[in-house]
Amino acid sequence: MALDHVDLSIEEGEFVAILGTNGSGKSTLAKQLNAILLPTSGVCRVAGMDTRAAERLWDIRQTVGMVFQNPDNQIIAAIVEDDVAFGPENLGVPSDEIRRRVDESLAAVGMTSFRGFAPHLLSGGQKQRVAIAGTLAMKTKCLVLDEPTAMLDPVGRREVLETVRRLHRESGITVVYITHFMEEAAAAQRIVVMEDGKIVEDGSPKAIFGRVDAMRKRGLDVPLAAEVAWKLQKQGIQLPENIVTNEELAVALCR
Amino acid sequence: MPIELRDVTYTYMKGTPFERTALQNVSLTIADGSLTAIAGHTGSGKSTLVQHLNGLLHPTKGEVLVDGVNLAGKKEEAGLARRKVGMVFQYPEQQLFEETVAADIAFGPKNLELSEDEVNRRVRSAMEFVQLDYETYKDVSPFRLSGGQMRRVAIAGVLALKPDYLVLDEPTAGLDPQAREELLRRIVDLHRKKKLTIIVVSHNMEDIARMAERVVFMHDGHVLVDAPPSKAFLADEKMREAGLTAPPTVALLSILRDKGLQVDADAFTADEAVKRILKAIQKKGGAKC
């Protein structure tokens, strides 16, 4: 059983990170969100649409876009802008509208200057941004990213995370972000922790990462600043609770 | 004997419009028993470099010697030299294919035409080394294991070939924190206990900082930095040039220093970072800043 009686509601405009060990059910959960997988029992609704309703499938997939781990598995066209146009073309969108959407989407991920490039000439982070643009061109309201930075170099990781944060902040896109990098999860508004197919924690990054011991016990980690703050406290250094970022630790130590 | 790259240049699709030089005059010696990490952004040439280490690619110019034997040689000895270098590719678990864990690990040694006893011995010891209990897992399908366990099966399959050198490309990518921790520990053990010479390619600066004795930053097809982690990761400018970022500990301590805490930034684990901060606070007579 990959998912075990999961109850979860993600609001429009939220940025939720999902954490959990390998095999905890994160990816299975993500695939429920745009009907790649359907629940064996129970119901999954996307913007009110039951994912089991076959006639709504394309509406669901237009609402929720997915970005996967491997950038090389998601790009199909020989030119960046053709790839971004692929989704709307298949939806039968008129060509001048496609043109507009492609331009907007590439601008939104900061890839306009690469629009005539062959994808294989791009870095991993750039390819992931093209993949994100591809979903934006379908006017998705929600972006589900399944370990989008696992194969990227540090610069690529930063590019992808910053793009996602900006889309959330400026365009109000709902984000579900699966990751093993705790620093990336700290950027979310809410963290859901999965274990054995169940949701075992659900709270703000501060609440979740403030409990270093509990996270360790689950085979997970916390951002470095949280761990260091926790260890300093154990050594008798007085610090405020719930430090998660480097800046917060710096402020606390250097006030 | 070491692995030596002598003035290696490699050009993809030479003589075509797509010609691209991925390595430019790279000279590098990987000493016996060392643990070297290779880092660099996408397209820096690091994957091209490691594919030279066991003769998957041959230099366009220059030569690669393993234990003094040129890998591009035609003779049998070149083939034997290539076998000394075990290669664990990215996401090696995608290459698992057998019905049981034991059969998958045995595939390589069987192809070396070893006796059945020897194959079994190697499978057992490789599994032991990656901490997969032989009796518990030998008959299990590798596809029923967790991601971390699958990766360890794949690594055991390479270890069973008894290489003298082990090259691992992004060994911890996609693993959860605990699986990553365990795998790093296993790799360091291979180095310390089995005296294997290890080369790790990684994007994860934290992993590199914690285990490597030597760090090579690749950039634009050449070696930009070749130094111990304590030096390499404090060279801000070179790191930026290579498109890399400091390990989290160094980044954290640097921020504290910028804010006025007199702290040394050369820590690569959380515990070391805590020690540095405590020391800085004590120096101030208990005052934090």
Image: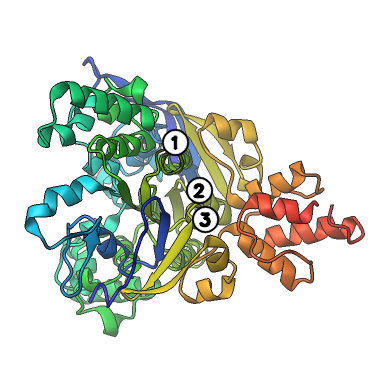
Gap in angstroms between the C-alphas marked 1 and 2: 17 Å
In what element is the residue under mark 2? Answer: strand
- Quickly name the residue at label 3: A186
Amino acid, disc 1: His
Q: Which chain letter goes with mark 1?
A: B
Q: Label 3: how many residues lie within 10 Å, few (<14), some (14-19) or many (20+)? A: many
- In the image, residue B55 lies at what x, y percent? 29, 40
Q: Which chain letter goes with mark 3?
A: A
Amino acid, disc 3: Ala
Instruction: Tell me whether marks 1 and 2 sit on the same chain.
Output: yes
User: In the image, is residue A87 above or below residue A47?
Assistant: above
- Quickly name the residue at label 2: B36
- Which numbered mark, 1 or 2, is in the foreground of this view? 1
Q: Which chain letter goes with mark 2?
A: B
For residue A93, side relative to residue B65 (left or right): left
In what element is the residue under mark 3? Answer: loop
Residue B183 appearing in the image: no
Q: Residue at x 64, y 35 (%)?
A: B236
Who is closer to the viewer here, A98 or B122?
Answer: A98
Who is closer to the viewer here, B204 or B116?
Answer: B204
User: In the image, is residue B59 above or below residue B87?
Assistant: above
> Do the CB atoms of the residues marked 2 and 3 lie less than 8 Å apart?
no
In what element is the residue under mark 1? Answer: loop
- Quickly name the residue at label 1: B41
Gap in angstroms between the C-alphas marked 1 and 3: 24 Å
Q: Label 1: how many residues lie within 10 Å, few (<14), some (14-19) or many (20+)? A: many
